[in-house]
Amino acid sequence: MIDVAVTGASGRMGAMIINTILKQDDMQLVAAIEAPNTPLEGKDVGEVMGIGLINVPIVGAEKLSETLKTKKPDVLVDFTIASAAVETIKTTAQSNVNLVVGTTGFTDEQMAENKKAVSDNQVRAVISPNMAVGVNVFFKIVEELAEILTDYDVEIIEAHHKHKKDAPSGTAVKAADLIAAASNRKMDEVGVYGREGMVGERTPEEIGIHAVRGGDIVGDHTVLFAGDGERLEIVHRAGSRQAFVNGVIKAIRYVVEAEKGKISSMDDVLGL
């Protein structure tokens, strides 16, 4: 049995992850973490979610270390915000608990901190900006196409719901980084984030990224390879957050046997 703790427990993703964990034969929820000093402190997470009593009280993140030592989960799952997740990752790693993190928006400096925490404490971790199985196949396809269509212009368009705080999405950033690396470019040199005004002609090296926000769009990503007289579009659309949750469940099962001290990707989880 894999014992799991979940942060952001009452949020949209947290609740779906908990719901899905409860349906697994080889997993059980042992801790539900919310923001520091949450007014939900002590309330049963199942009742907060509307599924009935499951005897797992919500605790504030200020008690994370104490909770991990008491409940001893095998894995902590984090889908929150980058600034909070960095501290959660440090505390969790120091408590010798493995990590599955789908939080997006980490800066390079924050990812360096994450890697150091995992390495220094020799825990296992999966960190990915998008855990949907289909989108990770999408990553593989666009990477391979970038190696072939070297003289095509590349544009990335992503669309998400109106509540998403970071832009562009972590998925779009990862797709751009993969394409740049496959075509011997660097995003800090060729990335163009939206366009406005008299920007002049597009250069062949540019990789454009455009963010759309509105309504309840779960997550759409399009990579456009545009050549003379033709274009190729690779599209992934998430119709439900359950697509991400299904990947999380795979990552939980993978991480308990993964290499210690290393951050694994969904490529590792899916054998891509």
Image (cartoon, grey):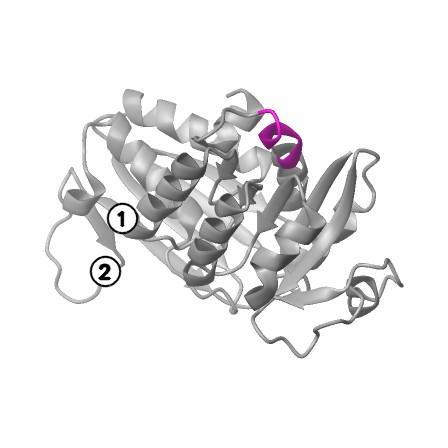
Would you say the residues marked 1 and 2 are in contact, meaning their CB atoms lie under 8 Å apart?
Answer: yes
Give how far across and how far down residue 40 sits, in percent: 70, 75
Tell me if residue 212 comes above or below residue 37 in the rendering. Answer: above
Left or right of 223 in this view: 23: right
Residue 79 image-quadrant placement: bottom right
Residue 255 is covered by the magenta coloring: yes
Q: Tell me where residue 53 sits by quadrant.
A: bottom right
Of all residues, the one furthest to the bottom in this rendering is 39
User: Which residue: 10% across, 55% down?
Assistant: 200
Circle number at residue 208: 1
Q: Is residue 236 left or right of residue 211?
A: right
Secondary structure state at the residue bearing disc 2: loop
- Find disc 2 in the rendering and name its residue: 195
- The residue located at (51%, 69%) in the rendering is 162
Q: Relative to 270, say whether 129 is above or below.
A: below
Q: Is residue 254 left or right of residue 162?
A: right
- Name the N-terminal-most of marks 1 and 2: 2
Q: Position of residue 110 (x, y in %)?
A: 34, 52
For badge 1, the amino acid type reads Gly
What residue do we see at 73% from left, 41% from top? 3
The percent coordinates of residue 7 (x first, y second) are 61, 57
Range of the magenta residues? 252-257
Q: Crowdedness of circle 1 by 10 Å Cα count: few (<14), some, many (20+)?
A: many
Is 9 displayed left or right of 27 in the figure?
left
Q: How much space separates mark 1 and mark 2, taking CA atoms? A: 9 Å
User: For the point 61% across and 46% down, which residue is it?
Assistant: 76
Three-letter residue code for mark 2: Arg
Q: Nearer the viewer, residue 27 or 216?
A: 27
User: Which of these two is toward me, 130 or 106?
Assistant: 106
SS at circle 1: strand
Task: Please indicate, yes or no, whether residue 254 appears anywhere in the rendered image.
Answer: yes
